[in-house]
Image: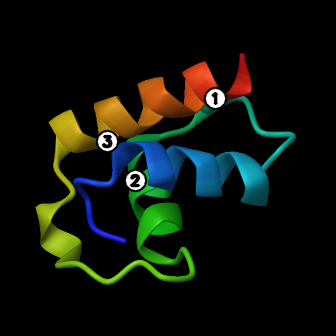
Amino acid sequence: MKWSDISAIAEALYDKFPDIDPLTIRFTDLHNWVVDLEGFDDDHTRGGEKVLEAIQQAWIDEAA
């Protein structure tokens, strides 16, 4: 999984943290959770704010 796999990351986060409201997450925590996902294999420094915002929005959509 790479940073560009926004939907797959959001689905994995939803599955791993089903009781978490994605609107309450700090980006530092979100970044750490993404890089700790099983199958994530990308440069940890590439997860900037825009990417994290996209992941957060996709997670919100997944949870809806």
User: On residue 28, which mark appears?
Assistant: 2
Label 2–label 1 contact, CB within 8 A: no
Which element type, helix, strand or loop, lies under badge 3? Answer: helix
Which element type, helix, strand or loop, lies under badge 2? Answer: helix
Residue shown at 41%/73% (left/top)? 35
Q: Position of residue 46 (x, y in %)?
A: 12, 63
Report, in whole angstroms, how far the alpha carbon at label 3 lies from the one at label 1: 15 Å
Residue shown at 32%/31% (left/top)? 53
Residue shown at 72%/16% (left/top)? 64
Mark toward the viewer: 2 or 1: 1
Query: With 24 as the anchor, is 5 left or right in this view?
Result: left
Residue type at mark 2: give it: Thr
User: On residue 52, which mark appears?
Assistant: 3
Mark 2 burial class by Cα count in 10 Å: few <14, some 14-19, many 20+: few
The picture quadrant where one finds residue 32 is bottom left
Residue at the far right: name it.
19
First in sequence: mark 2 vs mark 3: 2
First in sequence: mark 2 vs mark 1: 2
Report, in whole angstroms, how far the alpha carbon at label 2 lies from the one at label 1: 21 Å
